[in-house]
Image (cartoon, grey):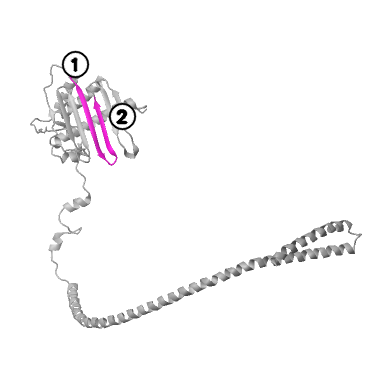
């Protein structure tokens, strides 16, 4: 549910605490498999990916990001207007899987829980297609953002020549 | 700070003046009553949710109207053509066929005759079963015969075993005869021409002793075989 509070107009854009956590996973044939990442207020980005398919093992990575990166993450969330949405009409987590999105930005705090989204057809056929579509596209953007940061920092040759 | 605010202003101006080909979707209302942002769609881009869901030809055909054979034209069917000479002939043929159908009633009597044939087939089947019984009895006899033949096989193997030692005896006899012949010839040469073939005779004299030894060994080995 969204607990909306008034923003501090006195403070600038960079002020206020920032926390973001996203989780998508399921429990099934190969155990508990999930993808999870979070931005901490101190600038630490934590990434975890667990899969037991074909004997894969847990991947855990941590990296500190600069204030400019945090600013970009804030901008992505601000422009999506996700803080004003409500997940009461979104599909509940089911056997197929579960998604969680938790954001703390300034005085606002939201925590969404829904089932996995297979495609936009699932979005259109839900009770709140407009709100779920915002969530769908925001998650895409955040995944691209986090994957780019992890690759740039950990790969030996992240930029192919 | 100042630079970021300027950037925001530029973005707003761009959004307010849509470019050629751009589309703006009206904002939707949230459950709590507030309006969402208007969505600006770039020229030439089709959002995913607006892409029509693909339907195969089969699905389209099903939706379009009743089941009618391809090329069907209701106008042609409506026009009733006058009967031609050929149609009249066909009608006459149909009448003849009906007469033949009445003849089929007579064929129904022949069906009764076929019923009697069915009885005969039953008799044939009974005879077949008798033949099967006879074949079964013959098979049982053959089985007993097979057992007898197996018993015969045993002594034949024994005879084979007996023949094996006999084959070795004639070989020994042949060797003995060959050695005796050699000895006789050598002795004859020695007696006949002692002066001419001195070297050869000396060699043969040595060999004669060896041949005699072999003869004794062969005769000794022959004794237990006999």
Categorize mark 2 by other alpha carbons within 10 Å: few (<14), some (14-19), many (20+).
few
The image quadrant where one finds the N terminus of chain A is top left
Q: Which of B210 and B91 is in front in this view?
A: B210
Question: Quick check: A95 above or below B84?
Answer: above
Residues at marks 1 and 2 touching, judged by CB atoms closer than 8 Å: no
Residue depicted at 74% across the width and 62% down the height: B220
Relative to residue A6, is residue A73 drawn left or right?
A: right
Q: Which of A32 and A108 is in front in this view?
A: A32
Q: Residue A48: x percent and y percent?
A: 28, 30
Relative to residue B136, is residue A147 drawn left or right?
A: left
Residue depicted at 21% across the width and 52% down the height: B58
**Can residue A84 be seen by looking at this rendering?**
no
* Label total for image: 2
Residue depicted at 26% across the width and 81% down the height: B114
Q: Mark 1 lies on which chain?
A: B
The question of residue A26 being in magenta is answered with yes
Respond whether the residues carrying marks 1 and 2 are from the same subunit.
Answer: no
Start-end of magenta stretch: A13-39
The question of residue A60 being in magenta is answered with no
Relative to residue A41, is residue B149 drawn left or right?
A: right
Q: Is the magenta stretch mostly helix, strand or loop?
A: strand
Question: Quick check: B76 above or below B25?
Answer: below
Q: Nearer the viewer, residue A7 or A25?
A: A25
Q: Residue B93: x percent and y percent?
A: 20, 76
Q: Mark 1 points at which residue?
A: B2
- Disc 1, SS: helix
Res. A60 mark = 2
- Disc 2, SS: strand
């Amino acid at each position: 549910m969204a607990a909306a509070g008034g923003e501090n107009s006195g403070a600038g854009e960079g002020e206020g605490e920032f926390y973001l956590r996203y989780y998508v996973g399921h429990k099934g044939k190969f155990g508990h498999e999930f993808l999870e990442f979070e931005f901490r207020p101190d600038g630490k980005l934590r990434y975890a990916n667990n899969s037991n398919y074909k004997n894969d093992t847990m991947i855990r990575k941590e990296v500190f990001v600069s204030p400019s990166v945090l600013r970009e993450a804030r901008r992505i969330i601000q422009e999506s207007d996700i803080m004003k949405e409500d997940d009461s009409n979104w599909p509940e987590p089911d056997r197929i899987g579960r998604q969680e999105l938790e954001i703390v930005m300034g005085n606002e705090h939201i925590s969404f829980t829904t089932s996995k989204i297979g495609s936009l057809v699932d979005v259109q056929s839900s009770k709140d297609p407009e709100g779920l579509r915002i969530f769908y596209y925001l998650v895409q953007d955040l995944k691209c953002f986090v994957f780019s940061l992890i690759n740039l920092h950990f790969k030996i040759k992240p930029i192919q020549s | 700070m100042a630079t970021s605010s300027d950037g925001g202003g530029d973005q707003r101006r761009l959004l307010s003046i849509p470019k050629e080909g751009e589309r703006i979707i009206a904002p939707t209302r949230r459950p709590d009553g507030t309006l969402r942002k208007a969505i600006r769609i770039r020229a030439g881009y089709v959002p995913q949710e607006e892409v029509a869901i693909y339907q195969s030809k089969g699905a389209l055909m099903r939706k379009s109207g009743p089941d009618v054979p391809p090329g069907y034209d209701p106008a042609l069917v409506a026009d009733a053509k006058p009967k031609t000479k050929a149609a009249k002939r066909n009608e006459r043929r149909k009448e003849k066929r009906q007469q033949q159908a009445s003849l089929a009633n007579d064929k129904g009597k022949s069906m009764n005759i076929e019923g009697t044939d069915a009885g005969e087939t039953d008799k044939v089947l009974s005879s077949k079963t008798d033949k099967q019984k006879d074949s079964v009895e013959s098979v049982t006899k053959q089985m007993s015969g097979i057992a007898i033949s197996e018993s015969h096989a045993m002594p034949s193997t024994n005879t084979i075993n007996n023949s094996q030692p006999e084959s070795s005896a004639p070989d020994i006899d042949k060797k003995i005869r060959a050695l005796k012949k050699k000895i006789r010839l050598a002795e004859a040469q020695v007696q006949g021409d002692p002066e001419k073939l001195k070297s050869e005779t000396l060699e043969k004299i040595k060999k004669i002793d060896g041949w005699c030894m072999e003869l004794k060994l062969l005769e000794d080995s022959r004794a237990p075989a006999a």
